[in-house]
Amino acid sequence: MYTDKVMDHFSNPRNVGEIDGADGVGEVGNASCGDIMKIFLKVENDVITDVKFKTFGCGAAIATSSMVTEMAMGKTLDEALELSNAAVAEALDGLPAQKMHCSNLAADALHEAIKDYKAKHP
Amino acid sequence: MKRIYMDNNATTAVRPEVIEAMLPFFHEHFGNPSSVHWAGRAVSGAVEKAREQVATLLNCSPAEIVFTSCGSEGDNMALIGSAEALKAKGDHIITTTVEHPAVLNTCEYLEKNGFRVTYLPVDRDGMLDLAELEAAITDKTILISVMWANNETGNIFPIAEIGEIARKHKVRFHTDAVQAVGKLPVDVQASKVDLLVISGHKIGAPKGVGAIYIRRGTRLIPLIHGGHQERNRRAGTHNVAGIVALGKACELAGAEIDENYAKLKRLRDRLEKGIIEKVGEVKLNGHPTERLPNTLNVSFAYIEGESLLLNFDMKGIAASSGSACTSGSLEPSHVMGAMCVEVSLAHSSTRFSLGHDNTEEDIDYVLEVLPPIVQRLREMSPLYNCKQDNCDNCDTVKML
């Protein structure tokens, strides 16, 4: 059902955890749909210097969260805002069709975290 | 890697004795039991022997057994066949919110075709209120359909008491006994059921065969029209090898019922106690005692079922989940919903269903590998040790 890349990120997720005193935090999803993703950012000079995630969800939810942290690390905020859910899925060599809508929210969580950072640092 | 199968409510391995019994009916005895010649005669006896074996297990006459292709066919036949046969008498059916989709979706089909269906709710333990059931009966009620045991929680419904109520009001009573047969004594006389459905692959026979008990005098409109097989009640050439297998599996189930029950319950109780003690923040889904001896359904707070199952799978453990992600829909299990299990716990509901081949060592292994998996996933979860005040999402896991 899942690609090798999804299983790799699911079984060895990168950047799990929280950042104490994060500069931006974003959360998407809710318990009723079965997925909650939370992204924590450290930002210096508009560049993402650290990013961590915590996720309640299925294999796809955890793998996309892990992948988006890898993709966002070191990017400027503007570059990170360009990352889409579809790009995250593509970087994982695809997701099963039924997961594309419900569990492919990691880029949204990243964007929420960037919005939170921008709101706090106008 | 170890391989531990704890998904026996989904399907079981075919028993070696069953394979041995069915094998001659592929090549050596290949005939059509409806044929009059030697090839047909050689197999028609085997079909009738299997019918007796099934009838013995259910305590009925062989003439009251009709072979089907699966549990779903049996349930469709019972519901649609009854509705069609009794539509002049009434248009109302009573069932429960926790039935298998084979019953629920058939009821929905009947609703689209002019019938009315009452879906009885269950309490938080997943049990029915029989007074409510009796109160739902009207003079238009033509059928009551209540499963003998629930596939997800293992809850056992009081079939004999429901049979009593149905008979008192002269309403036909159907039970989907797919999960009960082989795990509990199932007696159609003591329970006063009129229609009872079983499936081969849940009891050590192969997929593709089942049976329905039709009490003598219970008129059903057939679902499959064609030849005169099964006394015109179900057309289609007999699945002879499958039928022989079902007969053998029923014979084994009957002979081993006490031993099997005791063994499954001993293993399941150890697994249940071990998980609750070693993991913590675990909710049992289902009734504490009125439950199949082999079934354990638990929710692990803060984590989602599919990710749990994938981790179990990596350790060779096969179980199942009520999570939306494993149901093919966006909703978690309808059974968890009917029991008002809080939604994030419903997404984490995990079913272990033991079977004939499970051992004490299997339980040891699961109890060893499960706690660290749960802990690792919890540490990844934003719901676990959430430091946020008034977090809406955290409120959803408080109802343990």
Image: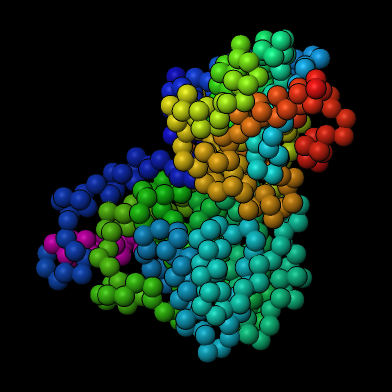
Q: Where is residue B19 drawn, in percent x and y?
A: 31, 44
Left or right for B125, reference B197: right
Quarter of the view holding residue B303: top right
Which residue sits at x=44%, y=19%?
B1
Foreground residue among A107 and B254: A107
Q: Residue at x 83, y 34 (%)?
A: B391
Q: Is residue B349 above or below residue B190?
A: above
Residue furthest out toward the bottom: B88
For residue B79, side relative to residue B271 (left or right): left
Q: Residue at x 20, y 70 (%)?
A: B34
Q: State yes or no: residue B176 in magenta.
A: no
The percent position of residue B109, horizontal first and vertical second, equals 51, 70
Main SS of the magenta part reads: helix
Q: Residue at x 68, y 52 (%)?
A: B337
Q: Magenta stretch?
A: B39-51
Quadrant occupied by the C terminus of chain A: top right
Q: Is residue A61 above or below residue B28?
A: above
Quadrant where the N terminus of chain A sits is top left
Residue B48 among those drawn in magenta: yes
The residue furthest left is B37
Q: Can see residue B368?
A: no
A71 to B131, vertically: above or below: above
Q: Between residues A113 and B41, which one lies in front from this camera angle? A: A113
Rendering colour mode: rainbow
Measured as percent of width and height from the top left, residue B393 is found at 77, 37
In percent of width and height, residue B248 lies at 36, 52
Q: Is residue B34 visible?
A: yes
